[in-house]
Amino acid sequence: MKEFSVISPVDGSVYAQRHYASVEEINAALARAQLAQPQWHSTALAQRQQLCSAMVDAFLDNSDEIARQICWQMGRPLQYAAGEVRGLAERARYMIEVAPQALRTIELEEQPGFTRYIKREPLGTVLVIAPWNYPYLTAINSIIPALLAGNVVLLKHSAQTPLCAEQLHRAFVAAGLPAGVFQFLHLGHADTEQLVAHPAIDQIAFTGSVPAGAMVERAAAGQFKHVGLELGGKDPAYIRADADLDYAVAAVVDGAFFNSGQSCCGIERIYVHEAVFDEVVERAVALVQQYRLGRSDELETTLGPLVKTSAADFVRGQIQEAVVQGARCHIDESAFPMSQAGTPYLAPQLLTQVNHSMRIMTEESFGPVVGVQKVSGDEEAIRLMNDSDFGLTAAVFTQDEAAGVAIGERLQTGTFFINRCDYLDPALAWTGVKHSGRGCTLSVVGFEQVTRPKSFHLKRV
């Protein structure tokens, strides 16, 4: 069996070693899933809810270990890692609560001589492909509704965060979930592609990069599988002249630099009305300078390393290219001594004098950098915010809600915020447009992705 290693970005050490599943193990998992699904489908929804709730309880019982593993596998500072554990519980419990509403039978109006209704049927076997950056939150968005709807689930997690799949499996086992209903497989790229194409897989819920999403579409093509894709983002924020600047600047800086900028819905572009531009930049620079770049396992650290050196080098290249093209750096990298070429440690950076001819304003960075561009007003801001291949979230900071909503109606985005950013509300549909993907998770709408409608048309004779 081929082994792989998890190289921790904290210190470059081998944190864990695992083996990729063999063909025999993959086929056995698929057989177990297909055997388990009919019985799981026939299990009452209330019992499915109970088992999923017990999983959450078991997961929380292991919170400290899970938080440490997040820190060491992908580099999030330890003081923030526990937030993902709590976030999983919040999202899972919300979806458990709304499942009866989301899955209820749709009764149609009375028609003499007929009974008509629509049920939501499970698809069968759902393959969840999860990324490393929010390893639990991205996975749970699909796992819980899929199980509640009567599907069985196979989880393929990132090779950077394989222990996350194991922790979820451990919690489900502790909860008493029947064998075969939730399984995980450690897979390389080729085997993942083959599994996507396998006829036993009925739905794929993928979160990751645009190129990898294109691979999923190609592999699934021609089989009419259900495919949900949550891909990248280059999410914009617009600070209007009437915004509460203290609040707005703090929000967008946190939105840009939390998790070292490694968030699909993180703020990567900021547009600021010219009347407050200088003040916003001054305040933002002061906040960015307060970050402490360091080892993720040190409690004082507020900005950890990127997941890999290659990811940090990619962002360095974007910054250097922008500077050559005329951008201005506002953060002195020497103030962050841990930031060194050839390592995943990268100082935060804020750039002005940027424009859309620069990759830093058009290409996903996925790192601790943000460009800040001056605009003359709402019309220019709307045009620039829409000038992107992506459309996951967009935020406007203003004290005029009506004006903000009017802007939001014109933005090409999956989620629109006023005076908020970089946040998922489990009651709202999580979706994107353009290269940010298609499909939906969370909210009652998210259950539609893991079910199909089945109509019943009964005539009384």
Image: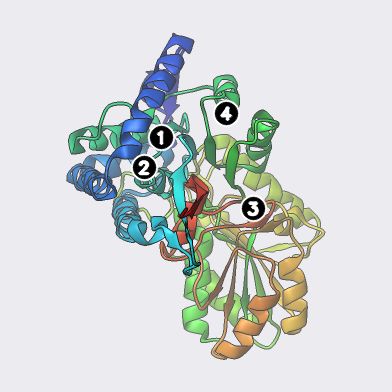
Separation of marks 1 and 3 at Cα, in angstroms: 24 Å
Q: CA distance from mark 2 to mark 4?
A: 19 Å
- Secondary structure beneath disc 3? loop
Label 1, secondary structure: give it. Answer: strand
Q: Residue 338 location, x and y as percent?
A: 47, 46
Left or right of 20? Residue 233 is right
| Residue 238 horizontal/vertical position (percent) | 63, 76
Amino acid type for the residue under numbered disc 2: Leu
Q: Which residue is mark 2?
A: 147
Report x, y in % for residue 319. 68, 52
Query: Which comes before the other along the chain, label 2 or label 4?
Result: 2
Whichever of labels 2 and 3 marks the residue nearer the N terminus, that label is 2
The residue at 48%/62% (across/down) is 113
Q: Are marks 1 and 2 in contact (CB under 8 Å)?
A: yes
Asked whether disc 1 touches disc 3, contact meaning CB atoms under 8 Å apart, the reply is: no
Q: Based on the displayed image, in which of its 4 quarters is residue 275 positioned? A: bottom right
Disc on res. 436: 3
Residue 399's place in the image compared with 299, above or below, is below
Name the residue: 73% across, 84% down: 377
- The amino acid type of the residue labelled 1 equals Val
Residue 153 circle label: 1
Identified by mark 3, the residue type is Ser
Q: Secondary structure at mark 2?
A: helix
**Residue 80: x, y in percent?**
34, 54
